[in-house]
Image (cartoon, rainbow, N blue to C red):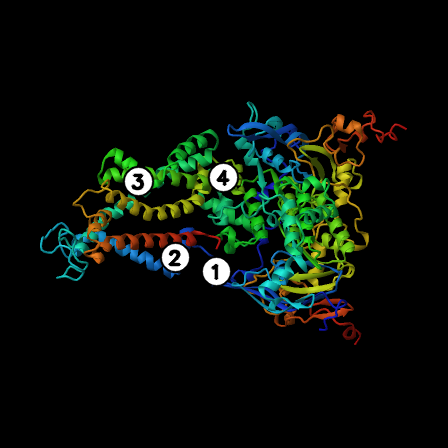
Amino acid sequence: MNASGKTGPLVEVEDLSVNFVTRESNVRAVNGVTFTMMPGEVLCVLGESGSGKSVTMRALMRLLPPKRSVITGKIRVAGEDVLAMSEAALRRMRGATVSMIFQEPMTAFDPVTRVGDQITEVIRLHRGVNQAAARQRALDLFELVRIPSAQQRLDAYPHELSGGLRQRAMIALALSCEPKLLLADEPTTALDATVQIQVLILLRRLQQELGMSVIFVTHDLGVAAEIADRVAVMYAGRVVESGPVRDVLRSPLHPYTAGLLASTVHDQPPGRDLETIPGAPPDMRNLPPGCSFAPRCSLAGDDCRTTTPPAIEAAPGRIARCLRVHAPEAALV
Amino acid sequence: MDTSTTLAPIDARDRGGPRQPLLIVRNLRKHFPIRSGVLGRVSAHVRAVDGVSFTVMKGETLGIVGESGCGKSTVARLLMRLLKPDGGEHIFDGEAVGEAGGISVAEMRRQVQMVFQDSASSLNPRMPVQGSVAFGPIAFGTPRDRALAQARQLLAKVGLDPVLYGGRYPHELSGGQKQRVNVARALALDPRMVILDEAVSALDKSIEAQVLNLLQALRRELQLTYVFISHDLSVVRWISDRVMVMYLGEVVEIGPSNAIYETPKHPYTRALLASRPALDPDNRRLEAPVSGDPPSPINPPSGCRFHTRCPFAEPVCSARAPALGEGDVMAHLAACHMQDAASGHSKAVREIRH
Amino acid sequence: MSTTTATASPPATINATPPRQRGYWGNVGYRLRYDPVTLLFGTVLLLIILCAIFAPLIAPFDPYQESIIRRLKPPGYRGHILGTDELGRDVLSRILFGGRITLTMGILPVMVATLIGGGLGVLAGFAGGLINALIMRVMDVFYAFPSVLLAVAISGAMGGGAVNGMIALTLVFIPPLCRVAETATTQVRNLDFVDAAKATGAPLRLVLWHHVLGNILGPVLIYASSLVSVSIILASGLSFLGLGVTPPEPDWGLMLNALRQAIYISPLVAAMPGIAILITSISMNMVSDGLRSAMDVRS
């Protein structure tokens, strides 16, 4: 790739696989995930627990335990090969190019240090500015994420902040070095409904103002609808469908996406049974051959149980891994 | 076999007939003391449940919604008497619970069971799941073998093959399977009422729908009465006949499900409903309905507890607490000064008078 | 309507996994069998205990038989496999016989303390409130002193001898075991399954027995087993100071004390009782570690 590439993709993941190896078992958490992402895009990785969505995200930052995890494939972030990086280069990337926010903000903060001091310290470390400048920047960040009475809140300890404020403070911390890419791992899942929507709107606004790219991991279709440009639906360690959020939510291609949409409770008439996907996700230590969704799929045939479906581009920008989905040319024949 | 007799419309334990509410709660209160200092002096109270009143009819499902700290889980534990209320009346099928001349707590517990949220900690990790299901009946004197046989039948009823799963330990089951076991355990004593405290909240969406369908089927088959507690408004709407909205330990609105969702009266209910993600990328929420987090229930705001976040707040709202009012069971009530023409609020309902 | 068992899962899955009917302890045993390290040290421990029990049968010499001419001979001297001590007694025989006293002083105090301390801890944890405060504050008083000092002080106050030494050790171990049991009980008591059991209306004693005890037994037993090696070392220390077992009884700590003066003359012999203590306590710790991982159902 040429290095001029401001117009090139920010993230390229090719055939990423992550195995967790222990003495007794081999968990195939991610099995050949491929996606690219342009600068300024918001990609939602949608999936249920155990689908490999968080593991994919951590692999992007190489945050997985090196002894127990085997990562194969290619990850390039801002043109650099993440899997080949030295520890020093990795440290520079984390925070400066890529930053991460989590479901539980308490994990990101030291409980016995004031939040303002923590953010100030990070800014000084990464930017080499003096204390006063760093403090001013921290205050600007708190105002950016709309923390009321920011000046006083800088001097608060993490436990003194409410859940929503803590989440905002963590976003401020993550933005302190102006990352090109923000990884968000279910940052609104633990929040109350009225607070969740505030944080979602804030993230959307920040993303647009700062021109950042965001990868947003969630299990909630509604959250994806609020924030995503594109979605990638994961099931059993694979991206089974990806495409623009509008198209995927309106006319899902993959039976799993369709089932997920149908079984999400949202103003269905009471008194009638909800549509469900029968069965449960597969054991990741012992994945079935062929399509992992076949055992739960109403459209599955014998071919699904033997052949792993290839990625098919059914429409421009829309990819599905399902034998029942056809490329447009094939459909015309 | 005994469950097939539920085709008979009248339960032997039924006292007042179908018109008598199964549960009446009046002015229920629970304040947790906060102790501080070396001597453990009480410095403040968490006013977790502060004067809650409601009624549950036989065979209906009452949904309780609200955000964290609103007291909905405390209500569940009070109804089960896992916590002792600080005040208020608690009447089960016409009999006062735990009072002289009423029904004893132990007897009430045989008729009211609970399903807990956290499927991980709600099953004994050292006990095969059929043992957990059979524990209640064994404690009440059912011979062990018969109780275990019943437990296996119940596991089958909630969709778990007893041969395959009965002898397993909780860690060998998935979250959805554990929650099915929890449902089976709640049914083991053949209760009349089940309290479901965030029973599906921890489950994946595709599993959540399965368990919700199961709960509805069981309710119909066994003629159960549910109190369904959740933070998920969509789920509550689907399962409930009536809905009660709580905020900081108080009931702010109660009424038939359709009324609450179609014509919410309280600004908080409207905010909650408007905070739900739209599921439509072309119709995104542009502005948050309310700002800030719910305040702490330790020192709740004066007057109407929602006035600190309410877009319509006026001086009267912080001065005086609005009353929920009274009505029959199906009445749609909201504790808001705007619903009371005499409150002095500038937006108080007037059109009704015209 | 069909009968109640109509809604079972599809038949295809029935023979997927065989039904598991191994009980909890069966599971623990099954896992221990596949843990070579624990098995190895368990065997060593078993051998040590068997040696102590059958000491009269396997000891090559009388452990009390002194000999002026055979003092402090090196290992291998005329059939004295581990040499002789400062009074010419066979060290191997004394270690074998000494195991009886030393192991008893290691295990018995811990067992008694587990019953008393564990019981108090469960009571404190489950009752909470005033009872908890009362029990735990008394324990805190004992906690204020280092265990060695406490053992020395108690047995010093009661006078020497093996029995008094064991009583002292028991008293030393009650507070930590009580603390562990109390912490475990408090944690378990707040879990939902205990509430669920209470919500069935079952009597409290059944809830305690079926849902609380089973879940704290693991941590308490594991902690107790790790205390055995501490107890052996403390018992040896008491004897070393002249407070536990009195001469000429063969106790490992006492032997270590007596042979201390010979450390420059016959260092190898002088080290023997120490090695015995070391091997026993390492084995005990390893077995306790193995037990800990085997008893963790979730792994």
Q: Mark 1 or mark 2, which is nearer to you? A: 2
Residue at 80 percent across and 48 percent down: it is B286
SS assignment at label 4: helix
Lower sequence index among marks 3 and 4:
3
Distance from disc 3 to disc 4, alpha carbons, whole Å, reads 30 Å
Report if the CB atoms under discs 2 and 3 are less than 8 Å apart: no
Distance from disc 3 to disc 1, alpha carbons, whole Å, reads 49 Å
Specify few, some or many for label 2: CA neighbours under 10 Å numbering under 14, 14-19, or 20 or more: some
* Position in image of residue C262 (x %, y %): 19, 53
What mark, if any, has residue C18 been given in the picture?
Answer: 1
Q: Mark 2 or mark 3, which is nearer to you? A: 3
Distance from disc 2 to disc 4, alpha carbons, whole Å, reads 29 Å
| Residue that badge 4 annotates | C189
Lower sequence index among marks 1 and 4:
1
Report if the CB atoms under discs 2 and 4 are less than 8 Å apart: no
* Left or right relative to B322: residue B124: left
Quadrant including the N terminus of chain A? bottom right
SS assignment at label 1: loop
What mark, if any, has residue C32 been given in the picture?
Answer: 2
Q: Identify residue type, mark 1.
A: Pro
Q: Identify residue type, mark 2.
A: Leu
Quadrant including the C terminus of chain A? bottom right
Subunit bearing disc 1: C
* Left or right relative to C71: residue C111: right
Q: Mark 3 or mark 4, which is nearer to you? A: 3
Quick check: do tags 3 and 1 share a chain?
A: yes
Distance from disc 1 to disc 2, alpha carbons, whole Å, reads 22 Å
Quick check: do tags 2 and 4 share a chain?
A: yes
Residue at 88 percent across and 31 percent down: it is B351
